[in-house]
Amino acid sequence: MSLWKYAIALGPVLLVSVGTSDYSVDKCEAWADGDVQIGILSSCYCKVENLYDRQQPEMLCSGFCLSSFVHMLAVIHTIETINNSSFLPGVRLGYYICDTCSDASKAIQSTARMLSENGTGPGPCDLTLNPRVKAIIGPRYSEVALSVARLLSLYMVPQISSTASAETLSDRLRYPAFLRTVPSDIHQTRALAELMSYYGWDWVGVVHGDDDYGHSALHSFLTEAVNENICTAFEESVPHLLDNQNIATRIQEVANIIQTSNTNVVLLILKEELVKKLFTEILKRNISLTWIATDSWSMSQDIAKMEGINEIGNILGFSFITGPLPGFEEYLQKLTTPPGVTNKLIEMYQKLDHKEDITEVVDISIAYGDRLAVLTIAHALKKLLDCNQTTCPGEKDFPPWKLLKELKNINFTLDNQTFFFNTSGNFVNGYDLIHWAQNVASGQRDFVVVGHYNLDQKQVTLMKAIKWYNSGNMKPVSLCSEECLPGTAKQLSKTSCCHNCTKCLEGTYSNGTNVQRCLPCENGTWSLIGWTNCTAKTDVYWDWHGKHATVILTFVLVGFFLLFVNLIIYIVYCKRPVMKQAGGYIMLLIMLGLALSFSSLLLFMGKPNDHTCRARQAFYGFGFSLTVSCILVKALRTYVAFLPRHRQHNVKKFYKPPVIITIGTLIQVLICIFWLIFDSPSMEIVDFPNVMEISFHCKEGSGIGFAFMLCYIAVLALICFVLALRGRKVPHRFNETGHIILSMLIYLFVWVCFTPIYVAKIPERYSIQAAAILVSSYGVIFFHLVPKWYMALCKKKDEVSKEAYIAQACSTRTSVDSGISQSSILSVPSVTGMHTSPSQSTMNSDDAGVCSTVHTTQSMKQFRNYQSITRRRYHRRSI
């Protein structure tokens, strides 16, 4: 039964002997005669009383253990059942029972007495010893069984245990005569690790006995735990012997560690007496956890009936597979000693002050392994003695090693299961998973089989749902660290079960919990930090349906509409003085330049490519250079017209409007050509890892060509600004210097603001560039085109005639700077719309005289006559 240290095995040991003899019943506790004698090493007493101060070979035992007592009775009952059947015709099985008091030294002493019952003590080199006891069943605990197995292997006396499960006992070299009707502990430790892994408990505490078996079981569990990624929060031991002087202190120390630990699951590799002591202390401290039981106490009625056991928390554990024991319950209810049989242990039990029936105190199914132990011996004897239906003619006084040989080869079926010993001397019948269900009515716990562990498949199979004893019936959680949610991965610390959760980096993802690493994105997909999946990035550019495109297109269409309106007005009023004074065909060139500038903005829309990137900059550079060159002509005209007469002659030869416009535009064309050849703009793809967008935009090469283009336009605009500023004192009614100054000032301001944004590579620089183009273009429209609409549509005809112009010029003559001659106030547009040279367009002396007349005339009638004369005079000049 004891999975770990002290396999709570069926306490007894069977020594098969032949014939009858007078046994000294004072040496051991029970005896019954038979043809083949079986020895039983019982553990009805749980401790040696005088262990620390004994001076004689005899040992005093105390502490009657009912569960070990049931194991012993199961062996006796099975022997009597076989004797009362015809299974071994003519052969009666006897038994000889000695108690080990759960102590290895006492067990060796009892075993030596059994082997010496042939009348002579065993000699150290006498390997042919033929004792009356032919086999031994027991002892219950692995620690004790290990000591006995050493002695019995010397004489090859078969030893069968139903509970001693230490892995060490599978060693065929050291323990060749040891057999057991349960699996090795290596399977149970694997089952325990599988159970913890199944429920996700990776942070558990372990308390074990301090004997060889306890350390071996701990080591086996830790090996299996590593394979299942389970870590231990603590590993504590308690004394195995119940009469150890430090046991109480040690129990309190372990309880302190359990109480302060952050684990919620504790594995107890202890025999039931130690578990009961520990639980008593735990209940005092109101500690409620999940406890994992080994086979040594997983079905302990004594613990299940403890006061307050329902407050201890959840209890799960593995037990050896159980089965029926026909007639055993009735046997226990009318327990008696047959005639000719001596059994001091039954007498001791009957003297105990107990009111409950033994079947209510102990779960008798735990003794199923003892029944199997007796039946394996019976099957081996049947073959060894050549039994048939009526008799067993074989020699009954055989050496024990012959029985051992037959035992290793037995194979029989019972309760729909096949039993045999594997090459390590173990049964391989698996484990039951036991849940300690609360019995509210009694305040105790009931044992419920909720699953199995299959040794071949190496997995736990659940048959029933478990009711957890916590709020909401939620599965207990016992983790060193919180689980890592999708989008994160474990970053392990020094302890493999403890970790930090780190978010997956860009380009990686995780879609499960507690993943060891994030997976890379595939097939061109991408993810951001902490994502649980990967998706394709979005292509970002000025889509025709996007908000940027909507705004820009709106302003572009409005701009084209204004140009169209201006074209209509120009066509209608092209022969009127107001249009001639505005520049005539120069107006058409300005409109063409602005149309190219607006067209460049259309190339900002849609997914760019190398061609659109080149075209949009060239369109703007060429278009706005044409516009500014035309404005330069107008600024120069005003500046030259109002120069003093002696300076006009030197300057007027540079006033060639077609040449100025052509050269001004051609220089920009050459700049753009060199730019496109040597440092051409191209499409650039910007793919930042921290965004789910791929930006497509234009890169203006190294930026040198782009800078030259803008700087050249800025130089032209600056020249216009200076010339207009110098000619700002001309008459206001026909003066455009203010318009030129404002439009050029707007252009320079906008592009000066744009330059640092462009140099800084701010993502919004393309939006700023488009806005700069719009503002620059609208500045020209509103300051050069719209005022002409007003003059053409809203002013009276006589207010825009040449005569009115001259009158206005004359009326403001005196306000002109004294450095400007009266004869060079303003040039007069010719009939063709193109300005004449300063010498031709400057008012002559007659005009100056007329101005004087106008100022001194008191009658409007006289002034009208003057207007008529003036018209005829200018008409003749033009002819």
Image (cartoon, rainbow, N blue to C red):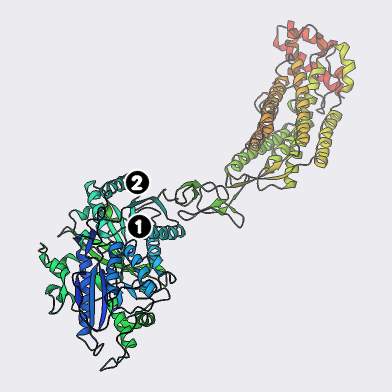
Q: Is residue 9 above or below residue 666?
A: below
Quadrant in which residue 226 is drawn: bottom left
Q: Nearer the viewer, residue 532 or 68?
A: 68
Count of numbered tags? 2
Using residue 174 as the reference point, say whether residue 654 is left or right of it: right
Type of the residue with mark 2: Ser
- The residue under the point 21% across, 69% down is 27
Please tell me whether mark 2 sits on a helix, a strand or a loop: loop
Q: Position of residue 313 (x, y in %)?
A: 26, 54
Type of the residue with mark 1: Asp
Please tell me whether mark 1 sits on a helix, a strand or a loop: loop
Q: Position of residue 543 (x, y in %)?
A: 62, 47
State the separation of the CA atoms marked 2 and 1. Answer: 24 Å
Is residue 468 visible from the viewing direction of this image? no
> Looking at the figure, which quarter contains the N terminus?
bottom left
| Labels 2, 1: front one | 1
Q: Nearer the viewer, residue 102 or 512?
A: 102
Which numbered disc covers residue 304?
none
Using residue 117 as the reference point, say whether residue 424 is left or right of it: right
- The residue under the point 37% across, 59% down is 212
Which numbered disc covers residue 261?
2
Q: Is residue 356 above or below residue 476?
A: below
Q: Is residue 368 above or below residue 869?
A: below
Local packing at callout 1 (Cα closer than 10 Å; few below 14, some 14-19, many 20+) is some
Q: Position of residue 316 (x, y in %)?
A: 30, 60
> Looking at the figure, which quarter contains the C terminus?
top right
Upstream in sequence: badge 2 or badge 1? 1
Q: Position of residue 520 (x, y in %)?
A: 58, 54
- The residue under the point 82% across, 30% down is 664
Which numbered disc covers residue 211?
1
